[in-house]
Image: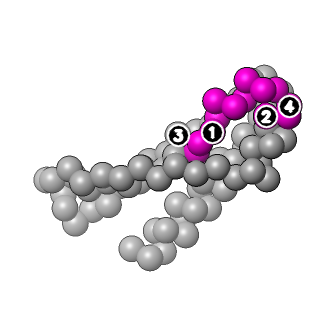
Amino acid sequence: LNASTYEFCSSILSHPLIAHDPANLMACPYAIGVYQLTEQPEKIHMAFRIPQGVPGSEEITAKIQQLIETIIISALEFL
């Protein structure tokens, strides 16, 4: 197994999320995992945690999920 996790935060998205409710702080950092399995070294897997916020935060968390998905799609273009 060869694996790395990349954690990051977007202040543009996180600030309104936390301003809505400080409990949303737990949604940061965002994380993307990239890994290869020993039995499939030619295949690269990617995984991410879907950000969850308190009720009423769905619009902002959807934007965060869109950002993560955009990063993953962009990364896949280089593979």
The answer to whether residue 49 is seen in the rendering is: yes
Sequence-first disc among 3 and 4: 4
Circles 3 and 2 in contact, beta carbons < 8 Å? no
The reply to whether the magenta stretch includes residue 24 is yes
Disc assigned to residue 20: 4
Residue at 66 percent of width and 56 percent of height? 67
| Residue type pointed to by label 3 | Arg
Badge 3: residue crowd in 10 Å (few <14, some 14–19, many ≥20): few
Q: Which residue is mark 2?
A: 18
Task: Nearest to the eye among marks 3 and 4: give it.
Answer: 4
Q: Earlier in the sequence, mark 2 or mark 1?
A: 2
- 3 or 2: mark nearer the eye: 2
Q: Amino acid at mark 1?
A: Cys
Mark 1 touches mark 3? (CB < 8 Å): no
Residue 66 lies left or right of residue 13; in this view the side is left
Badge 1, how many Cα within 10 Å: few under 14, some, many 20+? some
Task: Tell me the SS state at disc 4.
Answer: helix
